[in-house]
Amino acid sequence: MEAIKKPVGWLLIAISVVIGVQYVIQASYDSADVWLILDFAILAAVAISLIVNYLRKRSYDADNDDGLSREYFEANVLLYVSIGLTMMFLYNWIRLLVDGDDAFDVSDHLIIWTAVDVLTVIVSCVTGRYLIRND
Amino acid sequence: MESLKRIIGIVHILAAFAVALQQMSAPTWEDSGMVWDFLNPVMFVFIALALIFNFMRKRENDSAGGSSVTREYVESNVLFYLTAALAILFVYNWVGELTRGAEESRGTLTGIVWTYVNITFILISASTGAHLLRSLSK
Protein backbone atom coordinates (compact mmCIF):
# COMPACT_ATOMS: atom_id res chain seq x y z
CA MET A 1 0.00 0.00 0.00
CA GLU A 2 2.82 2.38 0.96
CA ALA A 3 4.63 1.68 -2.31
CA ILE A 4 1.80 2.92 -4.51
CA LYS A 5 1.12 6.14 -2.57
CA LYS A 6 3.65 8.25 -4.45
CA PRO A 7 2.78 7.06 -8.01
CA VAL A 8 -0.94 7.49 -7.28
CA GLY A 9 -0.23 10.96 -5.86
CA TRP A 10 1.62 12.00 -9.01
CA LEU A 11 -1.16 10.47 -11.15
CA LEU A 12 -3.74 12.63 -9.35
CA ILE A 13 -1.62 15.76 -9.84
CA ALA A 14 -1.15 14.91 -13.54
CA ILE A 15 -4.93 14.49 -13.97
CA SER A 16 -5.47 17.77 -12.13
CA VAL A 17 -3.10 19.64 -14.49
CA VAL A 18 -4.60 18.04 -17.63
CA ILE A 19 -8.18 18.85 -16.56
CA GLY A 20 -7.17 22.40 -15.58
CA VAL A 21 -5.46 23.10 -18.91
CA GLN A 22 -8.26 21.48 -20.94
CA TYR A 23 -10.87 23.44 -18.98
CA VAL A 24 -9.38 26.87 -19.69
CA ILE A 25 -8.52 26.24 -23.36
CA GLN A 26 -11.67 24.30 -24.31
CA ALA A 27 -13.35 27.36 -25.80
CA SER A 28 -10.53 27.84 -28.30
CA TYR A 29 -11.18 24.58 -30.22
CA ASP A 30 -13.80 21.84 -30.74
CA SER A 31 -13.19 20.02 -27.47
CA ALA A 32 -16.23 17.71 -27.14
CA ASP A 33 -14.35 14.51 -28.07
CA VAL A 34 -11.51 15.33 -25.68
CA TRP A 35 -13.98 15.61 -22.80
CA LEU A 36 -15.42 12.16 -23.67
CA ILE A 37 -11.98 10.68 -22.96
CA LEU A 38 -11.19 12.95 -20.01
CA ASP A 39 -14.47 11.98 -18.29
CA PHE A 40 -12.83 8.61 -17.55
CA ALA A 41 -9.81 10.41 -16.07
CA ILE A 42 -12.17 12.48 -13.88
CA LEU A 43 -13.94 9.26 -12.84
CA ALA A 44 -10.59 7.77 -11.79
CA ALA A 45 -9.57 10.96 -9.97
CA VAL A 46 -12.81 11.33 -8.00
CA ALA A 47 -12.89 7.61 -7.10
CA ILE A 48 -9.27 7.63 -5.87
CA SER A 49 -9.82 10.92 -4.00
CA LEU A 50 -12.93 9.53 -2.32
CA ILE A 51 -11.11 6.38 -1.16
CA VAL A 52 -7.95 8.21 -0.01
CA ASN A 53 -9.89 10.90 1.84
CA TYR A 54 -12.17 8.33 3.50
CA LEU A 55 -9.14 6.34 4.69
CA ARG A 56 -7.52 9.57 5.92
CA LYS A 57 -10.57 10.54 7.95
CA ARG A 58 -11.06 7.01 9.33
CA SER A 59 -7.42 6.80 10.33
CA TYR A 60 -7.62 10.16 12.13
CA ASP A 61 -10.93 9.33 13.84
CA ALA A 62 -9.55 6.00 15.12
CA ASP A 63 -6.52 7.59 16.78
CA ASN A 64 -7.83 10.92 18.06
CA ASP A 65 -10.75 12.24 19.96
CA ASP A 66 -9.27 15.59 20.95
CA GLY A 67 -10.30 19.09 19.85
CA LEU A 68 -10.28 20.74 16.47
CA SER A 69 -6.90 20.15 14.81
CA ARG A 70 -5.68 20.92 11.30
CA GLU A 71 -5.66 17.24 10.37
CA TYR A 72 -9.25 16.82 11.61
CA PHE A 73 -10.34 19.92 9.68
CA GLU A 74 -8.59 18.95 6.44
CA ALA A 75 -9.61 15.26 6.56
CA ASN A 76 -13.29 16.15 7.07
CA VAL A 77 -13.46 19.00 4.54
CA LEU A 78 -11.73 16.90 1.86
CA LEU A 79 -13.92 13.83 2.45
CA TYR A 80 -17.22 15.72 2.29
CA VAL A 81 -16.16 17.81 -0.72
CA SER A 82 -15.07 14.56 -2.44
CA ILE A 83 -18.49 13.00 -1.72
CA GLY A 84 -20.28 16.04 -3.18
CA LEU A 85 -17.97 16.06 -6.19
CA THR A 86 -18.52 12.33 -6.83
CA MET A 87 -22.30 12.71 -6.69
CA MET A 88 -22.32 15.72 -9.02
CA PHE A 89 -19.96 14.02 -11.48
CA LEU A 90 -21.89 10.74 -11.60
CA TYR A 91 -25.23 12.56 -11.94
CA ASN A 92 -24.00 14.62 -14.90
CA TRP A 93 -21.98 11.85 -16.55
CA ILE A 94 -24.81 9.30 -16.38
CA ARG A 95 -27.21 11.91 -17.79
CA LEU A 96 -24.76 12.57 -20.63
CA LEU A 97 -24.35 8.83 -21.35
CA VAL A 98 -28.12 8.26 -21.32
CA ASP A 99 -29.33 11.41 -23.12
CA GLY A 100 -26.33 12.19 -25.33
CA ASP A 101 -26.20 15.77 -26.59
CA ASP A 102 -29.80 16.32 -25.40
CA ALA A 103 -28.36 16.51 -21.87
CA PHE A 104 -27.05 20.00 -22.74
CA ASP A 105 -30.64 21.21 -23.25
CA VAL A 106 -31.09 21.12 -19.47
CA SER A 107 -29.88 24.47 -18.15
CA ASP A 108 -28.05 23.16 -15.07
CA HIS A 109 -25.99 20.58 -17.03
CA LEU A 110 -23.17 22.97 -18.01
CA ILE A 111 -23.23 24.69 -14.63
CA ILE A 112 -22.66 21.34 -12.87
CA TRP A 113 -19.84 20.46 -15.30
CA THR A 114 -18.20 23.78 -14.45
CA ALA A 115 -18.35 22.98 -10.72
CA VAL A 116 -17.13 19.41 -11.33
CA ASP A 117 -14.15 20.49 -13.47
CA VAL A 118 -12.97 23.21 -11.08
CA LEU A 119 -13.43 21.02 -7.98
CA THR A 120 -11.67 18.06 -9.66
CA VAL A 121 -8.61 20.24 -10.32
CA ILE A 122 -8.42 21.38 -6.69
CA VAL A 123 -9.41 18.12 -4.92
CA SER A 124 -7.13 15.92 -7.09
CA CYS A 125 -4.19 18.24 -6.60
CA VAL A 126 -4.63 18.46 -2.82
CA THR A 127 -5.22 14.69 -2.45
CA GLY A 128 -2.22 13.91 -4.67
CA ARG A 129 -0.02 16.26 -2.66
CA TYR A 130 -1.19 14.59 0.57
CA LEU A 131 -0.28 11.12 -0.80
CA ILE A 132 3.19 12.28 -1.90
CA ARG A 133 3.91 14.03 1.41
CA ASN A 134 2.76 11.04 3.48
CA ASP A 135 4.64 8.43 1.50
CA MET B 1 9.75 45.27 -0.68
CA GLU B 2 7.75 47.01 2.08
CA SER B 3 6.78 49.96 -0.11
CA LEU B 4 6.01 47.63 -3.04
CA LYS B 5 3.69 45.64 -0.77
CA ARG B 6 1.98 48.84 0.34
CA ILE B 7 1.45 49.99 -3.26
CA ILE B 8 0.16 46.57 -4.37
CA GLY B 9 -2.14 46.45 -1.33
CA ILE B 10 -3.65 49.86 -2.09
CA VAL B 11 -4.02 49.11 -5.81
CA HIS B 12 -5.68 45.77 -4.97
CA ILE B 13 -8.32 47.62 -2.96
CA LEU B 14 -8.79 50.20 -5.72
CA ALA B 15 -9.21 47.41 -8.29
CA ALA B 16 -11.88 45.82 -6.08
CA PHE B 17 -13.73 49.17 -5.94
CA ALA B 18 -13.45 49.67 -9.71
CA VAL B 19 -14.87 46.21 -10.48
CA ALA B 20 -17.63 46.64 -7.87
CA LEU B 21 -18.70 49.99 -9.36
CA GLN B 22 -18.61 48.60 -12.88
CA GLN B 23 -20.49 45.41 -11.90
CA MET B 24 -23.29 47.42 -10.28
CA SER B 25 -23.53 50.21 -12.85
CA ALA B 26 -23.06 48.08 -16.00
CA PRO B 27 -26.83 47.62 -16.68
CA THR B 28 -27.46 51.39 -16.55
CA TRP B 29 -25.39 52.41 -19.56
CA GLU B 30 -24.56 51.26 -23.06
CA ASP B 31 -21.11 50.17 -24.17
CA SER B 32 -20.26 48.73 -20.75
CA GLY B 33 -18.60 45.95 -22.76
CA MET B 34 -15.80 48.35 -23.68
CA VAL B 35 -15.10 48.96 -20.00
CA TRP B 36 -15.00 45.22 -19.35
CA ASP B 37 -12.58 44.86 -22.28
CA PHE B 38 -10.27 47.24 -20.42
CA LEU B 39 -10.92 45.74 -16.97
CA ASN B 40 -10.34 42.10 -17.97
CA PRO B 41 -6.54 42.40 -18.42
CA VAL B 42 -6.41 44.42 -15.18
CA MET B 43 -8.36 41.69 -13.36
CA PHE B 44 -6.05 39.04 -14.85
CA VAL B 45 -2.99 40.81 -13.40
CA PHE B 46 -4.60 41.22 -9.96
CA ILE B 47 -5.83 37.62 -9.86
CA ALA B 48 -2.27 36.47 -10.67
CA LEU B 49 -0.86 38.75 -7.92
CA ALA B 50 -3.48 37.52 -5.43
CA LEU B 51 -2.64 33.91 -6.31
CA ILE B 52 1.07 34.56 -5.68
CA PHE B 53 0.56 36.47 -2.41
CA ASN B 54 -2.03 34.05 -1.06
CA PHE B 55 0.15 31.06 -1.96
CA MET B 56 3.10 32.69 -0.15
CA ARG B 57 0.86 33.39 2.86
CA LYS B 58 -0.38 29.78 2.97
CA ARG B 59 3.14 28.38 2.56
CA GLU B 60 4.47 30.62 5.31
CA ASN B 61 1.67 29.46 7.60
CA ASP B 62 2.21 25.79 6.71
CA SER B 63 5.96 25.99 7.25
CA ALA B 64 5.50 27.62 10.66
CA GLY B 65 4.22 24.24 11.85
CA GLY B 66 1.69 23.64 14.61
CA SER B 67 -1.39 21.46 14.46
CA SER B 68 -4.05 23.78 15.85
CA VAL B 69 -6.67 25.49 13.71
CA THR B 70 -5.95 29.21 14.00
CA ARG B 71 -7.59 32.17 12.27
CA GLU B 72 -4.53 32.61 10.12
CA TYR B 73 -4.66 28.93 9.09
CA VAL B 74 -8.34 29.15 8.06
CA GLU B 75 -7.98 32.53 6.34
CA SER B 76 -4.84 31.64 4.40
CA ASN B 77 -6.32 28.33 3.18
CA VAL B 78 -9.76 29.71 2.28
CA LEU B 79 -8.23 32.67 0.41
CA PHE B 80 -5.74 30.52 -1.48
CA TYR B 81 -8.25 27.91 -2.68
CA LEU B 82 -10.87 30.55 -3.56
CA THR B 83 -8.24 32.44 -5.56
CA ALA B 84 -7.24 29.22 -7.36
CA ALA B 85 -10.88 28.56 -8.33
CA LEU B 86 -11.34 32.20 -9.36
CA ALA B 87 -8.23 32.03 -11.58
CA ILE B 88 -9.47 28.89 -13.37
CA LEU B 89 -12.96 30.31 -13.97
CA PHE B 90 -11.68 33.74 -15.05
CA VAL B 91 -9.20 32.30 -17.57
CA TYR B 92 -11.88 29.93 -18.93
CA ASN B 93 -14.35 32.77 -19.58
CA TRP B 94 -11.74 35.22 -20.83
CA VAL B 95 -10.16 32.72 -23.27
CA GLY B 96 -13.67 31.96 -24.57
CA GLU B 97 -14.34 35.65 -25.12
CA LEU B 98 -10.98 36.30 -26.78
CA THR B 99 -11.22 33.33 -29.13
CA ARG B 100 -14.90 33.47 -30.07
CA GLY B 101 -15.70 37.13 -29.52
CA ALA B 102 -17.88 38.63 -26.81
CA GLU B 103 -21.14 38.23 -28.72
CA GLU B 104 -20.71 34.61 -29.69
CA SER B 105 -19.41 33.48 -26.31
CA ARG B 106 -22.37 35.06 -24.51
CA GLY B 107 -24.68 32.49 -22.93
CA THR B 108 -26.35 31.50 -19.68
CA LEU B 109 -23.28 29.71 -18.33
CA THR B 110 -20.87 32.48 -19.37
CA GLY B 111 -23.10 35.07 -17.69
CA ILE B 112 -23.30 33.07 -14.46
CA VAL B 113 -19.52 32.51 -14.44
CA TRP B 114 -18.82 36.23 -15.07
CA THR B 115 -21.11 37.21 -12.20
CA TYR B 116 -19.40 34.71 -9.88
CA VAL B 117 -15.94 35.85 -11.09
CA ASN B 118 -16.68 39.56 -10.60
CA ILE B 119 -18.16 39.18 -7.12
CA THR B 120 -15.44 36.79 -5.94
CA PHE B 121 -12.79 39.09 -7.43
CA ILE B 122 -14.11 42.05 -5.38
CA LEU B 123 -13.93 40.01 -2.15
CA ILE B 124 -10.54 38.40 -2.84
CA SER B 125 -8.84 41.53 -4.18
CA ALA B 126 -10.03 43.64 -1.23
CA SER B 127 -9.08 40.94 1.33
CA THR B 128 -5.66 40.41 -0.22
CA GLY B 129 -5.02 44.15 -0.34
CA ALA B 130 -6.17 44.63 3.25
CA HIS B 131 -3.96 41.76 4.43
CA LEU B 132 -0.93 43.19 2.62
CA LEU B 133 -1.48 46.59 4.29
CA ARG B 134 -2.14 45.04 7.73
CA SER B 135 0.95 42.84 7.55
CA LEU B 136 3.08 45.99 7.11
CA SER B 137 1.75 47.63 10.24
CA LYS B 138 2.55 44.58 12.43
Image (cartoon, coloured by chain):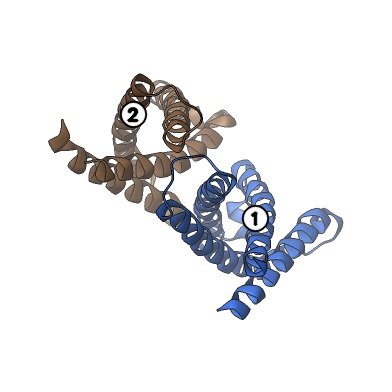
Chain colours: A brown, B blue
Q: Position of residue B57 (x, y in %)?
A: 51, 58
Q: Residue lying at the far left in this picture: please name it.
A: A3
Q: Are marks 2 and 1 on the same chain?
A: no
Nearer to me, B52 or B121: B52
**Which of the two marks, 2 or 1, is nearer to us in this view?**
2
Query: Residue A105: which quarter of the image?
Result: top right
Q: Position of residue B118 (x, y in %)?
A: 67, 53
Q: CA distance from mark 2 to mark 1?
A: 33 Å
The amino acid type found where label 1 is placed reads Phe
**Picture quarter with the C terminus of chain B:** bottom right
Mark 1, other Cα within 10 Å: few <14 / some 14–19 / many ≥20 = many
Vertical side of A129 occupied by B87: above or below = below
**Picture quarter with the N terminus of chain B:** bottom right
Query: Residue A92: which quarter of the image?
Result: top left
Pointer 2 with pointer 1, Cβ within 8 A = no
The kind of secondary structure element at disc 1 is: helix
What residue would you read off at disc 2? Answer: A56
Nearer to me, A125 or B35: A125
The kind of secondary structure element at disc 2 is: helix
Query: Residue A9: which quarter of the image?
Result: top left
Q: Position of residue A78 (x, y in %)?
A: 43, 33
What residue would you read off at disc 1? Answer: B121
- At 58% from the left edge and 53% from the top edge, which residue is drawn? B105
Question: Is any part of residue A102 visible from this angle?
Answer: no
Nearer to me, A9 or B34: A9
Vertical side of A95 occupied by B87: above or below = below
Q: Position of residue A90 (x, y in %)?
A: 41, 24
What's the mark number on residue A19? none
